Image (spheres, rainbow, N blue to C red):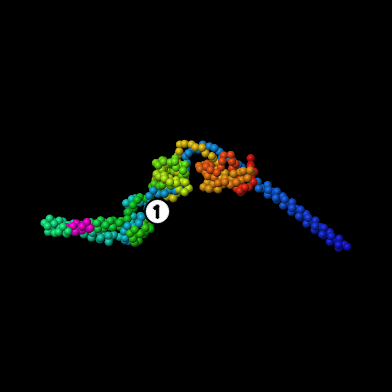
Amino acid sequence: MKKLIYILVVVVLIGAVAYTLNKNKKEMTEKAAVAEIKSEAIPVTLTEVQSAKLDKSFTAQGNFRPVQSLTLYSETAGQIQRVLKRKGDKVRAGELLVQVEDNTMSANLATAQANYQKAQKDLERMKNLAAGDAITKRQLEEAQINVASTRAQLVAARQNQGNTRVTAPISGEINEMYIEVGSFLTPGNTKMYDIVNVDRLKLNVKVSEAEVLLISRGQKVKVTANAGGAQEYEGTVTAIGAAADPTLKFDVEVEVKNAANNNLRAGMYGTAFFQVADQRDALLLARESIVGSIQDPSVYVVKDNKAYLRKVKVGVVTQDQVEILDGIQPGEKVVQSGQINLREGIQVTTLK
């Protein structure tokens, strides 16, 4: 009998423990669900686009390119005897860069000179003989043809001999060299130098269809290099694209005179500022509202206390504001802060 009572007590205790655990679990689940419901409403601050007057002046960015650059190839055959200019050296147009072995070319030039002189003397004799009808007209013509032929051979020999002295075709800086003393040159095939002139550079930028109408050739432009601090350079618009690219942008070329120390380099990223003495209406939004990059911008628009991601098109960008060209209408609520926790369609609450 005692054993039965003991078993009953144990069963009752186990049941009580199981009931208590189950009740606690249910309460914890309900509390977690309530907390989750509350946490879905993300606190954010809101803003709207503001109408304002903006200067029509604008900026455009691009890369600097040299006004002059070329790859120099050999024009003669032979072995290099001397290399006078190397990578990094500055050169002037016409300055000697390389001396090629010229023994053969000098011999050919001497032979051509001698042949031409002989042909001239032969022609003089033929003219004297022709005056006395001692030769035929055909013989005189052959002597004249021989003079013209040997003159052409002499010109070619002089050019070939001159090509053994390789000179710089433009002024600039040697950006790369491909030859050394002892290298054997093949006409038209051996690459020798890359020469770049950075005394003047071109900044190639792209502008919108509205902006291109505000630009004219010869217009003065302020230019800065992103890596060059606050130093400004004066640029001149030298070319404007006649047709837009697939993104409806127009190419604009701005020529810039480099500083005395040539601190601007080809390939650097630069910004051109186009000054326009006029104003226009614009919609401005706090820059911190932008989600993603300025190149691919989006914002969260709030409707019925829910956030929805929307692509926008931006124009002028300042330190704390961006111009909205498309994607947001006046009066729409936009998330200014708190975007980090947002996702499409999530519930939000507004912080005052």
Query: In the picture, residue 241 is in which quadrant?
Result: top left
Main SS, magenta region, reads helix
Residue sitting at the far right: 1
Depth check: give the residue in front, 43 or 135: 135
Residue drawn at x 40%, y 47% is 201
Locate the C terminus by quadrant: top right
Depth check: give the residue in front, 212 or 96: 212
Residue drawn at x 51%, y 37% is 281
Percent across and percent down for residue 90 are 37, 51
Look at label 1 and name its amino acid.
Answer: Asn
Check disc 1: other Cα within 10 Å, few if <14, some if 14-19, many if 20+: some
How many marks the image carries: the answer is 1
Query: In the picture, residue 349 is in which quadrant?
Result: top right
Residue drawn at x 59%, y 42% is 334
**Bounds of the magenta segment:** 140-150
Residue that numbered label 1 is attached to: 175
Is 79 magenta? The answer is no
Q: Which element carries disc 1, helix, strand or loop?
A: strand
On the question of residue 225 being in view, the answer is: no
On the question of residue 2 being in view, the answer is: yes
Residue drawn at x 53%, y 48% is 296
Q: Is residue 226 above or below residue 126?
A: above
Percent across and percent down for residue 273 are 45, 42
Percent across and percent down for residue 176 are 39, 55
